[in-house]
Amino acid sequence: MLRRNPTLSRLKGGYLFPEIEKRTQAFLKCNPDAKLISLGIGDTTLPLPPLIAEAMARKALELATVQGYRGYGPEEGLQELREAIAHTLYGDSFSFEEIFISDGAGSDIGRLQAFLGGGLKVALQDPVYPVFLDGSLIFDAQEVRFLPCLPENNFFPDLSRAQGCDVLYFCSPNNPTGAALSYEEMKELISFAHRNRSLIVFDAAYVPFVQRSGFPRSIYDVEGASEVAIEVNSFSKLVGFTGVRLGWTVVPKALSYRGGEKIHADWRRFIQTFFNGASRLAQAGGLAALTPLGRAASQKNMTYYLKNAALLKEGLQKVVARVYGGEHSPYLWAHFPKKKAWDLFEEFLTQFHLVTIPGSGFGPSGEEFLRLSAFGSRDSVREARARFDR
């Protein structure tokens, strides 16, 4: 029989979210009348803006005609969408050839990890979204270093801990802490990558939630980033495409390996081998999302979720003194000193009938924390807030 892939033995026993589901179902079995509210997984809940859904519907009907039918598209994505992203979101600082359309940020992060190969030393923010750690282990990273991001350091790590690392994985606004890097912090990160000759893989999926000046909306807002960083982004939070699946990755032509070869050419070849392109329907929706009306609809959704976060934070502060996030992110990061994260999960489940995410699932530095999501409906958020008064 086939030998098991040895890298899979490096993973923890269970992925975070299935374990939460298992515990939630066990609670419901014993408490069938409980009315649970999920403040857990970061899935959007608002319906798609009509103009975006209509654009996808028109594309579907077009594919039902002899004249309009098309099969496979370019592996890198439709040029029209790549040009729209380059122009609308990056001010034409990149050519369309540097924009690669994907079926979502999570998928492209996995492809990037496979592309970069094994035997690397990688550094992760701690706490960190589990995909970054699990993917690094599956693709046989030689060493994984955690960079603690805590209230004491304003959630920006001591980068000297990443000295000698080949790849730095960063996410801003961060999942789960909700912290957004300032321009000064971003400059420090990019400067370090240049000195250390490291590649930054930057997850920008939550950038649409950044509402104030003083916070970059792309790693490329800071000079020198195009020589050291790949940015991964998504339409999931931007317009609610969590079920539609569409994203993009920016691989600048300025990026080089240590030997001087260009990363861009290799990534293009890799994608042409392993990816047949994103759905034509999803890409039609993406184009509509980048029109002025589409962007206005997106901003309306961001405002809605951030209002949810403010309401939830106000209620949560009645039961815990320290709550972070919620300003540039839909996530709240609640600190309960000297308490275990899974105990906190059980406490919120039994006492408030709320499903949360234990911070330890995001890394060692999340042990005393819970993550709460503001992606619910306004009614469910108000009800959750009211339960903190009881």
Image (tube, rainbow, N blue to C red):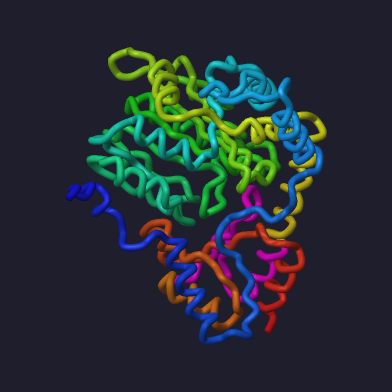
| Residue 224: % across, % down | 48, 21
- Residue drawn at point x = 44 percent, y = 34 percent: 201
Question: Which image quadrant is residue 351 in?
Answer: bottom right
Which residue ends up furthest to the top in the rendered image?
A: 260
Instruction: Tell me, yes or no, if residue 290 can be seen here.
Output: no
Let me know if residue 332 is in the magenta part: yes
Q: Nearer the viewer, residue 374 or 185?
A: 374
Residue located 64% across and 17% down the image: 92
199 sits to left or right of 182: left
User: Within the image, what quadrant is residue 350 found in?
Assistant: bottom right
* Residue situated in front as seen by the camera: 248 or 323: 248
Quarter of the picture holding the C terminus: bottom right
Residue 316 position, x and y percent, is: 63, 70
In the rendered structure, which segment of residues is drawn in magenta? 311-338
The answer, for residue 45, to whether it is visible in the render is yes
User: Which residue is more in the foreground, 97 or 306?
Assistant: 97
**Residue 142's x, y, as percent?**
23, 40
State left or right for residue 19 relative to residue 289.
Answer: left
